[in-house]
Amino acid sequence: MRLRPGKSYPLGATWDGAGVNFALFSEHATAVELCLFDGPEDLVESQRIPLTERTDMVWHGYLQDVRPGQLYGYRVHGPWKPRLGHRFNAAKVVLDPYAKTIGRPLRWTDANYGHKQDDPQADLTRDDRDNAAFAPLAAVIDPAFSWGDDRPPRTPWHKTIIYECHVKGFTKLHPQVPERLRGTYEGLASEAAIKHLKDLGITAVELLPVHHHAIDGHLIKHGLSNYWGYNTLSFFAPDDRYASHHDAAVREFKTMVKSLHAAGIEVILDVVYNHTAEGSQLGPTFSLRGIDNTSYYRLMNKDRRFYQDFTGCGNTLNMQHPRVLQLIMDSLRYWVQEMHVDGFRFDLASALARELYEVDKLGAFFDIIHQDPVISQVKLIAEPWDLGEGGYQVGNFPVLWTEWNGKYRDTLRKFWKGDGGQASELASRLSGSSDLYEQSGRRPYASINFITCHDGFPMRDLVTYNQKHNEANKEQNRDGESHNNSWNCGVEGETLEPTVNVLRARQMRNMMASLLLSQGVPMICGGDELGRSQGGNNNAYCQDNAMSWLPWSLTPEQRAFMEFTRRCIALRKEFPVLQRRKFFQGRRIRGSQVKDISWYDPTGKEMTNAAWNAHFVRCLGVRLAGDMMDEVDENGDRVHGDTLLMLFNAHHERIPFSLPAAPPGQGWGLVLDTAKDGACGPEWGGGVPYDLEGRSMVVMKTPAHLPAGGPR
């Protein structure tokens, strides 16, 4: 097979209609061989082709006779000097970091390790066994796809409602999805799946990692799986385990995006650029470690045998190296431009911000994203923490970024659990967390509000268990968070006790209503609306089974809660005051005697400093002035709507709440009461006490009053 020099850009394997250009970066390699395989069952490559051209530390070549579908990998030669950070081992076939699809999955064997396995010091001794029969292989793709008139929905942040879900788990048990499509990209694009999302009112799905990932060897030995997928093997390849045909993952992923876009639903990817599946110095050699360990990973300064680990997964990508930054940016642009996704949620984003050791919000990673004409225009969500010192960075990310608001989660859990001393913090979280985001020039929608997510208890378990029950993970219940701010309502686990189940259902309504009616961007954990339980497991990352999959055979109680969730989303969309783009000012607007936001105690008087600081306060109300918003829409017209009154009672007893005055001739119309399954009711006048049941939330409204002259 004749090899031409080819080009050093783009990196990866690029089909041009006549042949394929191969390009691989390695700064410290001494030689690179391209290995071609005829099929996934081959025990050894059919051809080894030395790439003799090297430009700007990129090894490259062009093969005219290669076509899409060709399986390939690399053997990279270089020094084996672990104490200096070099772990080259040409006995190992390594995966192209730019692989667009996986043609053969990883097969676990000790031969995949670049070092001996005898003892903790064995990583200093090279293992020369050939792993060609077991290594994951890339496949050349033809990127052609008919997108038609596909366009990104571009839902504004203040109108966004996120649904976090797993591609497989969402439809694996869905009876209305064709059986062959359940658990796949096409299953998520099916009519039944999209109907559920549309009926709820969801505007964006946030998919747990779809980058092709490795399943840890110790999980396989225990009959478990890396279900969540936070163990990336390839930053470009969609995981073919979610494809109905193993060689069609790219096409089926694109079809899914196109179908969701047609329904007006955005696609956000949970991406893991902070570490890879290769683990610590004791881990296997799959890709980056064998291509150029010292360039791709952050190594300890005093002993480069070891890795800096800010992720808890053994390694951290080296964001100080320009080629690593290029790898990540090329990946992000690929998913936007070629796969048409609408945004990203960055796992352990603080690890990406570490310039030297400390987290630096003005680090190179953010600089590059801010100036990028593609990535700066999509939705960017940070998980604003990692496991390193100073890694908890909620509120510290720069403009353009939104954040998973962990303080929102913790406060709402504590308040509804009945903890004291939460009133002031609750007010901040419900009104958009201005204390975290306003000073940096961001808006309320910088706060991604959530009470539950994939990691931890689902909402049903949050009201059913005080303790984690992770025995099924086979780690003696040592894994998972022990501080959950959960409350079992009096009985640990499932029970037939009616009073307990009534209270649990109400607590779920309280949390769901609070989430969906807060300022900021709500994120629902997929399955919460169905009352999904994990049996008390709060770390189901390894449970690829009915524990994690969404249940679709619903009880009447589950159906009622799903309808309640749908109704809360509809209320959010109905009232403009719940979709503000600006923070409340807490003062009178445009000469009015009414503030844009006011907080009340049960006597109907505004909260005092003493009340805000009192540990016993578990009941308060807030008035949101819909006609005092001081905002305009995209046409320049003033935004206005009904004024809302929301009452919160986390106390266990009923409290008569004296309603604040309504506009002359108007009363407060009951919109929602979680103690009455969300039922509406009659009007109530100002000053009249409303019996606010123990552990309940109430929403009331009064019609908007236009200012003189009508809308601007």
Image (cartoon, rainbow, N blue to C red):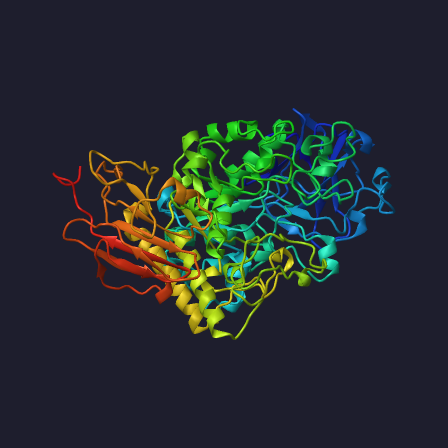
Q: Quadrant of the N terminus?
A: top right
Residue at the top extreme, as displayed: 56
Q: Is residue 620 visible?
A: yes
Residue at the left extreme, as displayed: 709
194 to the left or right of 77: left
Q: Is 422 placed above or below 16 here?
A: below
439 to the left or right of 549: left
Q: Is 603 placed above or below 2 here?
A: below
Quadrant of residue 585 within the rendered picture: top left
Q: Is residue 156 visible?
A: no
Residue 14 location, x and y as percent?
Answer: 58, 38
Residue in view at x 55 percent, y 70 percent? 494
Q: Quadrant of the C terminus?
A: top left
- Closer to us: 674 or 520: 674
- Closer to us: 160 or 79: 160
- Closer to us: 386 or 429: 429
Residue 273 location, x and y as percent?
Answer: 60, 40
Residue in view at x 31 percent, y 65 percent? 679
Quadrant of residue 431 within the rendered picture: top left
Q: Is 234 placed above or below 457 here?
A: above
- Closer to us: 364 or 410: 410
Q: How many numbered circles does the render carry?
A: 0
690 to the left or right of 160: left
Residue 490 location, x and y as percent?
Answer: 54, 66
Residue 479 location, x and y as percent?
Answer: 67, 54
